Amino acid sequence: MKKFVQMALALCLMLLAVQVSASPYTDKVTLPEGAVITNVNRLAIGAPLYVQVEDTAPSIEILTQVVADAARVTRTNVVSYDTVVNGVKESKGVDLKTLPRRDAAKTFKENVASFADAYVILTVANNSRTVFFFDVYRSGSNELLYTYEVRANSTDGNTVATFSSLSEQFYKNWQRSVDAQNKGK
């Protein structure tokens, strides 16, 4: 009996180790109480808060495009940052890309409601492991609707492939959260 318990424990530990190692990234979803994400039909991408720390890491322009391209894994309609920039430029005569970062963010928030129901802002932390924080806000009111944090593995570099994979994880989890909230109704 003692040998059976030892073997069962060893099997459980091995299964747990395989399960943990199979998970590519560590992530965390936060849905504030009372937040409704099921009525978000269009999601705009805001300018990421990002500083390129390595020469091999993507530039902010490439990162913005990577986040937009990763949206192919979701059913949500995603509006790229460039679409919003061009729309604001046509309607208001203001080029967000030439403004200082804070002024551009303020103008983006004031005008994004014309393009989407909500917008996502990506914050990138480049420590020993790259961490992406995606914050989704309601357009117009700037109410926080959803947050998603995903950490790359320590062996992953700051590359387009890693950034693309992390962005795809956001969209997959966003879709799962929307589907779960729809089922809860």
Image (tube, grey):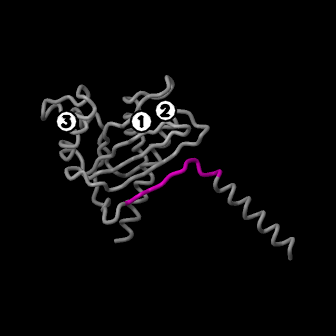
Name the spot of residue 5 as percent of width and height, x first.
Answer: 81, 72
Tell me which label, 1 or 2, sits earlier in the chain. Answer: 1
Q: What element carries label 1?
A: helix
In the rendered structure, are the residues bearing label 3 and label 1 in contact, judged by CB atoms less than 8 Å apart?
Answer: no
Residue type, label 3: Gly
- Magenta-tinted stretch: 21-31
In terms of image quadrants, where is residue 103?
A: top left
In the rendered structure, are the residues bearing label 2 and label 3 in contact, judged by CB atoms less than 8 Å apart?
Answer: no
- How many neighbours does mark 1 have within 10 angstroms: few (below 14), some (14-19), or many (20 or more)? many
Query: Compared to 51, does 106 lie above or below?
Result: below
In the rendered structure, are the residues bearing label 1 and label 2 in contact, judged by CB atoms less than 8 Å apart?
Answer: yes
From mark 3 to mark 1, how far is it between C-alphas?
A: 20 Å
From mark 2 to mark 3, how far is it between C-alphas?
A: 27 Å
Residue type, label 2: Val
Residue labelled with disc 3: 87
Q: Is mark 3 on a helix, strand or loop?
A: helix
